[in-house]
Amino acid sequence: MENPLFNLLLNVVGAENISNKKFELLCYSRDSGSSFPRLPEYVIIPRTTEQVSDVLRIAGRYNKPVMLRGAGSSVCGAPIPIEGGIVVDMTAMRKIVEIDEDSMTVTVQAGITWTEMLHELGKRGLETGLEGPWSAPSATVGGSIAVNAICIGAAKHGGIGEEIIGMKVVLPNGDVLKTGSGANPACAMVERYCNGADLAGLFIGSHGAFGVITEATLKLYPVHEADENLAFAFDDVESLSKAIQSLVKNRIPYDARTFVYPVPEQMGDKTGIVIWLRGNEEEVQRLTNLARTLMVKNGGREVHGFAQTYYAERFTTRVKAFGAAGPGWLEVAGFVPVSYYPRVTRVVMDYFAKRASEMKNLEIKWSLGGLLMQRSINVPVALFCNEQNKEAWLKMHEYLQQVAGLMYSVGVSPYWIGLLSPYIMWKLGSAYTLFRIIKQTLDPKNILNPNVL
Amino acid sequence: MQLKDFKDEIYKCIRCGFCREMVLGQTFRICPLREKLGFESSYARGRMIIARAILEGELTYDQQLIERIYCTLCGNCMVHCPLEIKTVEVFKALRADIVKSGCKLPENIEVVISNIRTYHDAFLTLTKKAWPVPKKTLAEGAELLYFAGCVARNKYPSIIRASIKILEAAGVGFTVLGEDEWCCGNPLFSYGELDLAKEVAEHNVAKIRELGVKKVVVSCAGCYKTLKTEYPKILGKIDFEVIHLSELLKELVEKGKIAFNAEHSQKLAGKVVAYHDPCELGRLSGVYDSPRKVIKSIPNIKFVEFQRNRENSWCCGAGGGFKAFNPKLAVDIAYDRVDEAVGLGANTIVSCCPTCKWNLTEAVRRKKMNVEVLDLSELLVSAMSV
């Protein structure tokens, strides 16, 4: 049957890079989480920024919603398509565009995975500040920027935006934009805050609602010389939080994770923290001594051996644990000041305590932890069920909505919005109004990820 | 086992995507098909979604879906899955489900199945004369049978001749099935044609039992895995041991039974040999060291490892019946492996599987590259006094 839209898209990307077969659409209907699947109408795989631009122009002409997809390894529903829309699979755009050792920057296409980028950088004795999220072997750099993924190394380097110098972005009307110093065609991408307001920030965590990131430039560092991993158990979240505050004040860890529920056996059923220190030999030794002193001073007991294994297997630890607990899996997460942490964890634990019996019957499990940022702590709450139990699957979504609202009410600011959008975004008041105005201006036909705002 | 028997395995997938293109440690990319086709359905994560949709009745087989199901069954996704999902078994169950559903299989696959059903051989080219050595009688006290396999018989009789020369020179008593040797059934197990697979397995096992041997030595990685792993699954315990030729050769080398010829060995000077792990021998059967030890024992050869070796080895593109199904794409995949060898400075690729040799050789020829592709037996015999 004649299908003008399909033919136009085919002309852009070629027959081998477009599909509307149901089995293919199903494969793009989900991410790693347990969001309910939705079928797009087409999937396309662009190879160049120009192709992305052409696709957006065509989609605009036909009023077809477009969802961007990196690795699809998120749990926040970020790439779940709009029913009947177009999914743009960015993973074929995976080249390293430039490694600039003079300016210490790396420019990559959006679809490259973190571990591939680091593999190539490692050959030159270089690394990025962040290692990517815990799904780094599959997660793409562009996808991580779009959802503001919390990455390994956030305790030292902060959110992903802190490591971004600039981006090449295709706007909803198909225009191509370079941010920062890259906006000047005569200048390289070396500085973010110049040539006017910070445009890069508009796209970080935007879930692709304002534009499609096709290239990103990140900061580079020499490969670190030394590491140390430490683990400490604490009697309660209050003393753990005080210990974390001392880490924040002294800028100690490269990465740090807390366990509130469930707690690994090695922690002896108490709350705990694993810490990764990085630097040169002397610095790591100094930080190790300081961390030990501060942890013990705040009531921590060192747990030997656990942190080394935990971090050595960091890319599979979470998948294995969550796969065993679920494998269906949803997550809500966001930042709070560390001083809020005891209260937030108490609220979450009370919520689940009241539903313990129902959750036991439905075999729904949950977990609560923490990921240290530079100045705050990210509090992830994960829910697990076996999707073969449809009642449990539905119930898990209900819990997620309620927990998200509850957490927001005690000060948690979600770092990604994804499937939380309907519960959270409208509560943001004038910030939300401004988002809507920007969206209306950039994307008057509401083509790009139309539901996230 | 049927697809429904893998339900828990299929639901176990959390779609982390580590089977897509992980680059970590010695792992450089995961799925040869995904690298060529790009779409989610071309690798394990998408196929798990497809399998689940089939089980849940959301998807039914059509010709395009059926054609997408076939891959090389190389198992790279399986060994790198953090949840240890038996992806290869799920893919094979999907293929068996297609056969059971009565859907028309792709024409190239039908041809192979028909050949085996009619001629007991995966190829049509075999004539009785093509069997390169006469059926031998069991030597006094010999307990060994050499099983050649369809690909060597049809495409590379040189592998059979080399293997037999080595065994004879080393004083190993052995016999062969000759014309009683049917295709091992590897393509049938791969394509899910399990009733016929059982028939050929029963035939081969009966004929082997008639000879009363205790051990079967196999030079093809596909035959090896089929006899060793698939036959017991479909027939129950079999009462003979199955070993790969490389394992026997390693033993012979260690016992000093292989006599190298100084003049012949001298001609090998300048050979830079990269060993390609066949998926069905290495990743799927765990035989990694024997071939390497044999190669390293040969004088005057420089041995180099592929960057992707052992469990991280990159498939040649031919496995799982994929070469018969899509010969062009199979060779496209082989280009990657040949390029990798050339990048190492290798001028010779050695494998332990005639199908790998066939596919890699086609890639070399099409690209007009100055690389020789040899079976382990061919390399070894060239250095011996035979």
Image (cartoon, rainbow, N blue to C red):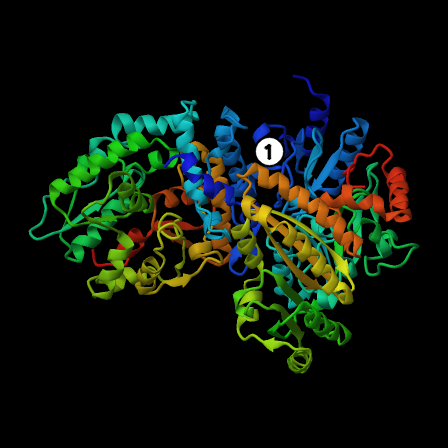
Quarter of the image where one finds residue B292: bottom left
| Residue drawn at x 12%, y 43% as measured from the top left | B211
Badge 1 local density, few (<14 within 10 Å), some, or many (20+)?
A: many
Foreground: B323 or B297? Answer: B323
In the image, residue A441 lies at what x, y percent?
A: 90, 39
Secondary structure under the numbered disc 1 in the rendered image:
helix
> Is residue A179 among what the camera can see?
yes
Foreground: A85 or B58? Answer: B58
Left or right, residue B334 beside residue A71: left
In the image, residue A320 lies at what x, y percent?
A: 53, 55
Q: Which residue is mark 1?
A: A26
Q: Chain of mark 1?
A: A
Looking at the rendered image, the quarter that the C terminus of chain A falls into is top right
Tag 1: amino acid: Leu
The furthest residue to the top? A1
Quarter of the image where one finds residue A246: bottom right
In the image, residue B35 lies at what x, y percent?
A: 56, 44
Looking at the rendered image, the quarter that the N terminus of chain A falls into is top right
